[in-house]
Image: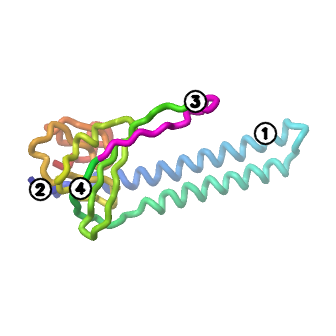
Amino acid sequence: MAYSSKINDQAFDRYRQNTKNWRFGFSLIIAAIAVLGFYVYGALSSEMNNPEALQIGLTIALMFILIGFFSTRTRTDSRTWDGVVIDKSVRKTNKDIGYNGVKAERLIFIVFVKSEDGNTHAIRNEDDDTVYDYYKIGDKVRYHGSLHSYEKFDKSGDTIVFCNACAFMHDINDDDCRNCGCPLLK
Protein backbone atom coordinates (compact mmCIF):
# COMPACT_ATOMS: atom_id res chain seq x y z
CA MET A 1 0.00 0.00 0.00
CA ALA A 2 1.62 3.20 -1.22
CA TYR A 3 1.57 5.80 -3.94
CA SER A 4 3.88 4.76 -6.73
CA SER A 5 7.22 6.48 -7.28
CA LYS A 6 6.91 5.58 -10.97
CA ILE A 7 5.05 8.87 -11.43
CA ASN A 8 8.48 10.44 -11.96
CA ASP A 9 9.25 8.20 -14.96
CA GLN A 10 10.29 10.09 -18.10
CA ALA A 11 7.61 8.25 -20.10
CA PHE A 12 5.01 10.54 -18.52
CA ASP A 13 6.96 13.62 -19.64
CA ARG A 14 7.12 12.23 -23.19
CA TYR A 15 3.39 11.45 -23.10
CA ARG A 16 2.52 15.01 -22.01
CA GLN A 17 4.77 16.52 -24.68
CA ASN A 18 3.40 14.23 -27.40
CA THR A 19 -0.15 15.14 -26.39
CA LYS A 20 0.64 18.86 -26.63
CA ASN A 21 2.32 18.38 -30.01
CA TRP A 22 -0.61 16.34 -31.32
CA ARG A 23 -3.13 18.97 -30.23
CA PHE A 24 -1.24 21.82 -31.85
CA GLY A 25 -0.51 19.76 -34.98
CA PHE A 26 -4.19 18.87 -35.32
CA SER A 27 -5.16 22.55 -35.07
CA LEU A 28 -2.64 23.37 -37.83
CA ILE A 29 -4.13 20.68 -40.09
CA ILE A 30 -7.67 22.00 -39.52
CA ALA A 31 -6.42 25.55 -40.16
CA ALA A 32 -4.82 24.49 -43.46
CA ILE A 33 -8.05 22.77 -44.51
CA ALA A 34 -10.02 25.95 -43.74
CA VAL A 35 -7.68 28.11 -45.83
CA LEU A 36 -7.66 25.65 -48.73
CA GLY A 37 -11.43 25.11 -48.56
CA PHE A 38 -12.27 28.81 -48.64
CA TYR A 39 -9.71 29.46 -51.39
CA VAL A 40 -11.26 26.74 -53.57
CA TYR A 41 -14.74 28.02 -52.74
CA GLY A 42 -13.72 31.54 -53.77
CA ALA A 43 -12.22 30.26 -57.01
CA LEU A 44 -15.21 28.12 -57.99
CA SER A 45 -18.19 29.92 -56.49
CA SER A 46 -20.20 32.66 -58.07
CA GLU A 47 -21.34 33.85 -54.61
CA MET A 48 -17.94 34.86 -53.25
CA ASN A 49 -14.62 35.56 -54.94
CA ASN A 50 -11.04 35.56 -53.78
CA PRO A 51 -9.53 37.40 -51.90
CA GLU A 52 -12.72 37.77 -49.78
CA ALA A 53 -13.13 34.00 -49.42
CA LEU A 54 -9.43 33.60 -48.69
CA GLN A 55 -9.60 36.27 -45.97
CA ILE A 56 -12.46 34.42 -44.29
CA GLY A 57 -10.47 31.18 -44.51
CA LEU A 58 -7.40 32.86 -42.99
CA THR A 59 -9.50 34.30 -40.16
CA ILE A 60 -10.96 30.89 -39.35
CA ALA A 61 -7.49 29.33 -39.63
CA LEU A 62 -6.12 31.85 -37.15
CA MET A 63 -8.94 30.94 -34.77
CA PHE A 64 -8.03 27.23 -34.99
CA ILE A 65 -4.34 28.01 -34.42
CA LEU A 66 -5.18 30.08 -31.35
CA ILE A 67 -7.42 27.32 -30.01
CA GLY A 68 -4.57 24.82 -30.53
CA PHE A 69 -2.10 27.13 -28.83
CA PHE A 70 -4.31 27.77 -25.81
CA SER A 71 -5.33 24.12 -25.48
CA THR A 72 -1.66 23.19 -25.08
CA ARG A 73 -1.13 26.00 -22.58
CA THR A 74 -4.14 25.18 -20.38
CA ARG A 75 -3.00 21.59 -19.83
CA THR A 76 0.14 22.72 -18.03
CA ASP A 77 1.08 21.14 -14.76
CA SER A 78 -1.21 21.87 -11.86
CA ARG A 79 -0.57 20.87 -8.32
CA THR A 80 -0.73 17.36 -6.94
CA TRP A 81 -2.84 16.78 -3.86
CA ASP A 82 -4.09 13.96 -1.65
CA GLY A 83 -7.69 13.29 -0.77
CA VAL A 84 -10.28 10.76 0.35
CA VAL A 85 -13.32 9.35 -1.45
CA ILE A 86 -16.22 10.68 0.62
CA ASP A 87 -19.30 9.73 -1.41
CA LYS A 88 -20.58 8.14 -4.59
CA SER A 89 -23.83 8.67 -6.46
CA VAL A 90 -25.67 7.66 -9.59
CA ARG A 91 -27.89 10.18 -11.34
CA LYS A 92 -30.31 9.72 -14.18
CA THR A 93 -30.54 12.33 -16.88
CA ASN A 94 -32.42 12.62 -20.13
CA LYS A 95 -30.09 13.66 -22.90
CA ASP A 96 -31.20 14.96 -26.28
CA ILE A 97 -29.83 12.57 -28.89
CA GLY A 98 -30.48 15.01 -31.71
CA TYR A 99 -33.40 13.42 -33.50
CA ASN A 100 -36.52 15.61 -33.38
CA GLY A 101 -36.25 16.16 -29.65
CA VAL A 102 -35.91 12.45 -28.84
CA LYS A 103 -34.26 11.98 -25.47
CA ALA A 104 -32.40 9.00 -24.11
CA GLU A 105 -32.04 8.19 -20.44
CA ARG A 106 -28.40 8.25 -19.36
CA LEU A 107 -26.76 7.32 -16.08
CA ILE A 108 -24.08 9.58 -14.62
CA PHE A 109 -21.76 7.80 -12.17
CA ILE A 110 -20.05 10.23 -9.78
CA VAL A 111 -17.29 9.66 -7.24
CA PHE A 112 -16.72 12.54 -4.81
CA VAL A 113 -13.21 13.18 -3.49
CA LYS A 114 -12.46 15.62 -0.69
CA SER A 115 -8.99 17.10 -1.02
CA GLU A 116 -6.68 17.97 1.84
CA ASP A 117 -7.65 21.64 1.52
CA GLY A 118 -11.34 20.80 2.04
CA ASN A 119 -12.52 21.16 -1.57
CA THR A 120 -14.74 18.48 -3.07
CA HIS A 121 -13.92 17.18 -6.55
CA ALA A 122 -16.06 14.92 -8.72
CA ILE A 123 -15.00 12.09 -11.03
CA ARG A 124 -17.86 11.72 -13.54
CA ASN A 125 -18.52 9.00 -16.08
CA GLU A 126 -21.56 8.68 -18.28
CA ASP A 127 -23.07 5.20 -18.76
CA ASP A 128 -19.93 3.45 -17.48
CA ASP A 129 -19.68 2.30 -13.86
CA THR A 130 -16.12 0.91 -14.04
CA VAL A 131 -14.44 3.86 -12.29
CA TYR A 132 -17.42 4.16 -9.94
CA ASP A 133 -16.95 0.53 -8.86
CA TYR A 134 -13.14 0.89 -8.70
CA TYR A 135 -13.28 3.48 -5.91
CA LYS A 136 -14.76 2.76 -2.49
CA ILE A 137 -15.83 5.32 0.10
CA GLY A 138 -12.86 5.91 2.39
CA ASP A 139 -10.19 5.19 -0.26
CA LYS A 140 -7.19 7.49 -0.06
CA VAL A 141 -6.33 8.94 -3.46
CA ARG A 142 -3.68 11.19 -4.94
CA TYR A 143 -4.56 13.57 -7.75
CA HIS A 144 -1.63 13.92 -10.17
CA GLY A 145 -2.12 17.44 -11.48
CA SER A 146 0.26 17.11 -14.41
CA LEU A 147 -1.74 14.15 -15.73
CA HIS A 148 -5.19 15.18 -14.47
CA SER A 149 -5.71 11.69 -13.04
CA TYR A 150 -6.20 9.92 -9.72
CA GLU A 151 -4.17 7.13 -8.11
CA LYS A 152 -5.44 4.94 -5.27
CA PHE A 153 -3.21 4.51 -2.23
CA ASP A 154 -4.29 0.92 -1.53
CA LYS A 155 -4.41 -1.19 -4.67
CA SER A 156 -3.76 -4.47 -2.84
CA GLY A 157 -7.27 -5.88 -3.35
CA ASP A 158 -7.71 -4.65 -6.92
CA THR A 159 -7.78 -6.77 -10.06
CA ILE A 160 -7.48 -3.79 -12.41
CA VAL A 161 -5.49 -0.56 -12.58
CA PHE A 162 -5.93 2.46 -14.83
CA CYS A 163 -3.09 4.11 -16.72
CA ASN A 164 -2.65 7.56 -15.23
CA ALA A 165 -1.64 8.99 -18.60
CA CYS A 166 -4.30 7.70 -21.01
CA ALA A 167 -6.84 6.09 -18.59
CA PHE A 168 -6.62 2.72 -20.37
CA MET A 169 -7.72 -0.13 -18.06
CA HIS A 170 -5.25 -2.97 -17.37
CA ASP A 171 -4.94 -6.14 -15.37
CA ILE A 172 -3.24 -5.39 -12.05
CA ASN A 173 -0.33 -7.67 -13.03
CA ASP A 174 0.63 -5.54 -16.07
CA ASP A 175 3.60 -3.24 -15.60
CA ASP A 176 3.30 -0.88 -18.57
CA CYS A 177 0.36 0.51 -20.49
CA ARG A 178 -0.06 -1.28 -23.80
CA ASN A 179 -1.82 1.80 -25.18
CA CYS A 180 0.68 4.62 -24.43
CA GLY A 181 3.74 2.83 -22.99
CA CYS A 182 3.74 4.66 -19.65
CA PRO A 183 4.36 2.67 -16.45
CA LEU A 184 1.30 1.70 -14.44
CA LEU A 185 1.19 3.22 -10.97
CA LYS A 186 0.73 0.28 -8.63
Q: CA distance from mark 2 to mark 1?
A: 59 Å
The circle on residue 102 is 3
Q: Which mark is residue 40?
A: 1
Boundaries of the magenta span: 89-101
- Tell me the amino acid under the disc marked 3: Val
Give the secondary structure at mark 2: loop
Nearer the observer: mark 2 or 1; the answer is 2
Mark 4: secondary structure: strand
**Type of amino acid under label 4:** Ile
Which of marks 2 and 4 precedes in the sequence?
2
Task: Please state which of residues 161 and 25 is positioned toward the viewer in this rendering.
Answer: 161
Q: Which amino acid, by three-letter code, is at mark 2? A: Ala
Q: How many marks?
A: 4
Query: Which labelled disc corresponds to residue 86?
Result: 4
Q: Nearer the viewer, mark 1 or mark 3?
A: 3
Read off the residue under disc 2. 2
